[in-house]
Image (cartoon, helix red, strand yellow):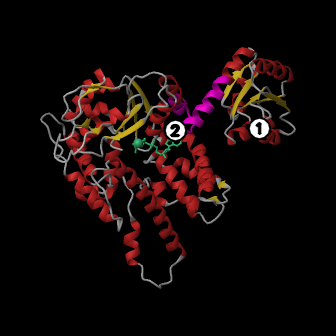
Amino acid sequence: MSSQILIAMDDLETAVRLNGAFEAAKFSTAMFSSLDDARGTVRRENPELVILTGAVHEPHVQQLAALAHDAEISTLALLEPTDSERAERVGRLRATEVMTKPVAPDDAVATARRLIDRRHLQERTGIVGESAPIQEVLVKIEQMAPVSSTVLVQGESGSGKELVAKGLHDLSPRRNGAFITVNCAALPETLLESELFGHEKGAFTGAAERRLGRFELADGGTIFLDEIGEIPLSTQVKLLRVLESRTFFRVGGTQPIKVDVRVVAATNRSLRDAVTLGEFRDDLYYRLNVLNIYLPPLRERRGDIPLLLRRFIREFAKTHERPFRGITPEAMQRLVNAPWPGNVRQLRNLVESMVVLAPGAEIRASDIPADVLEGAGTHSLRSGQALLPMRMQQQQPGRDVPVQELEFILRSLVDLRLQIEELRRRLDDHPQRVQVIELADHSAVADVMSENDRDGDQPVLYRPGMTMAEVERATIEAALKEYRGNRRRAAEVLGIGERTLYRKIKAYHLE
Ligand SMILES: Nc1ncnc2c1ncn2[C@@H]1O[C@H](COP(=O)(O)OP(=O)(O)OP(=O)(O)O)[C@@H](O)[C@H]1O
Ligand SMILES: [Mg+2]
C-alpha cells in the first residue's frame, strides 16, 4: 500500500516521534532515508506529503525538496532554531511550509492535515498555483462554499473566475443541484430578462410556450452570473429584488415565484468604477459584494507560471499524444517574464499550440511566438486575429513553401481552432439568437456577431459631470464592445495606434 506521508529520517528522534503521532491520527506513513533512495521512494510511494525532519541546509535534502516540488507533492520542513540564522540557505529550500523545532506532534499533524486538504481542494477545483494570492483564494473558497451568501468574483479576463465559481458550487452542500451559467453580456435587455426569469406563453411576440428562466432551473443549486457589469440598469432593479427576497415574476407573469438559489457573480471590470460612472446601481453592488474573491492577474503572481506551464504541457502532451519532455530553462524564463494580458487562458492556449507545433520533444525559446513576449496576442477573440484567411489568399498553389511559412500556417490553424472554440462557447450563451452559423470564413461570423450587437441601444458616452478621461474610457469601452474586443479594429476606428489603445485599456482597467 502506498503511503500518504513520507517522513525523512535525517533527525531520527523527531521522525520516530512524528511517525507515531501520524499513525495515531490514522495516516498511513513510511520513514525513509533521504540520503539513500529518496527519488525511488518518492516515486514508488507517490505520497501526498513529504516531511523533512532536519539537515535542511544539506544539498541532498534541498534536492529532495526540489524533487517533491516538481512532482507537485507538498513538503513540510522542520527547521532547527538556528536555521533562521542560515536564512540564505534555508531560503533556497523549496518547502510548501516550514515549522521551527521543537514541534509539538499535534501541531505537525494539524499542519499536515491542512496541507493535504489544500492539495485535495486544488485537485477538485482544478485551480493550480502556490503563490500567496492563489492560496488565499483557495482558503476563501473553503470558507465560502458551505454557506449560501452571494459571492462576487472579480479579476481580469482569463484569470480563473469561472473555475472559482464552479469550485464554490462543487464544494457546497448544493453540489448535487444544478450549476447554471448566464453570460449577462451576451444577450440584449429583453432576452436577458426572459433568460433569467423565464416568460409566460404569449408574453411577447414569439413567446409561443411558457419557458422557465435560469433562476428556476438553478433552484436548489447555484446560478453563475458572468459579466455582471454588463447588465442593463432596468434588469439590475429586478435582480436586486431577487437577491433581497429570492422571488421574481416570469416575464408576462403575475404569480411570484420563490427559489432557493445561491448567486455567484463575476466581472472583469471594476464594479466600483461602474457605480461611479452611473452604470451600476450601488445598492445592487453592495448586495452582490457580501463576500468577494479577487483573482490577481497572472503578471502579479509570476511564481505560478512554471507550475501552470508544467501542468498544461503534461495535459496537452497527453491529449495530442505527443512524447513531450517539457520545456528548456531559457524558454521557461522568457515565459515567466512575458506580460500575459490574457492571463491563464492565454498561457493555456499558447501551451496547447506549442505542444502541437514545437518540432522537438521540448518547448524551446525559439518556439515562442514574438507577440506573446511583446504582450500583443491573447490567443482569444478579444485581441486575436484570424490571420489565416488573409495569408492563404496570398499563397499561390504549387509554389515552394518555406518551412517558416508552413509553421506559420500551422500555428494560425491552431489559433483559428481556439478562436472557433471560443466563438462556440459564446454562441452557446445565446442559443435563441443565432441558430445556424456557416463557418465559411471568419468575417462572416464577425458580421453576424456585430449585427447582433447593433440591436442593443447605443451606449451613452457623455453625461453631465463626466471628466475627459471618463469620456475617453467610455468611448474605448464602446468601441471594444462594438468590435467584440478586437483591439486592432477598435484602434483603427478610433484613429489611434494599437499600442496606444493597449496602453489605455490597461490604464482604464478595461481588460
Ligand atoms: N489557477 C488556474 N489553474 C489552472 N487553470 C486555470 C487557472 N486559472 C484559469 N485557468 C484556466 O484558464 C482558462 C480561463 O479561465 P476562466 O474561464 O475561469 O477565466 P475567466 O476569469 O472566467 O475569464 P473571462 O473573464 O474571460 O470569462 C480556463 O481554461 C481555466 O481552466
Ligand atoms: Mg469566464
Q: Secondary structure at mark 1?
A: helix
Q: Is residue 117 magenta?
A: yes
Farthest left residue in view: 464
Image quadrant containing the N terminus: top right
Label 1 neighbour load within 10 Å: few <14, some 14-19, many 20+: many
Residue named by callout 2: 301
Residue that appears at 59% across and 59% down: 320
Above or below, 210 against 483 in this view is: above
Residue that appears at 37% across and 22% down: 290
Above or below, 13 against 69 in this view is: above
Image coordinates of residue 28 in percent, x first then y, are: 77, 27
Q: Which label is found at residue 64?
A: 1
> What range of the chain is rendered magenta?
113-137
Whole-angstrom CA distance, mark 2 to mark 1, is 25 Å
Which amino acid is tagged 1? Leu
Above or below, 280 against 497 in this view is: above
Determine if residue 483 is in view.
yes
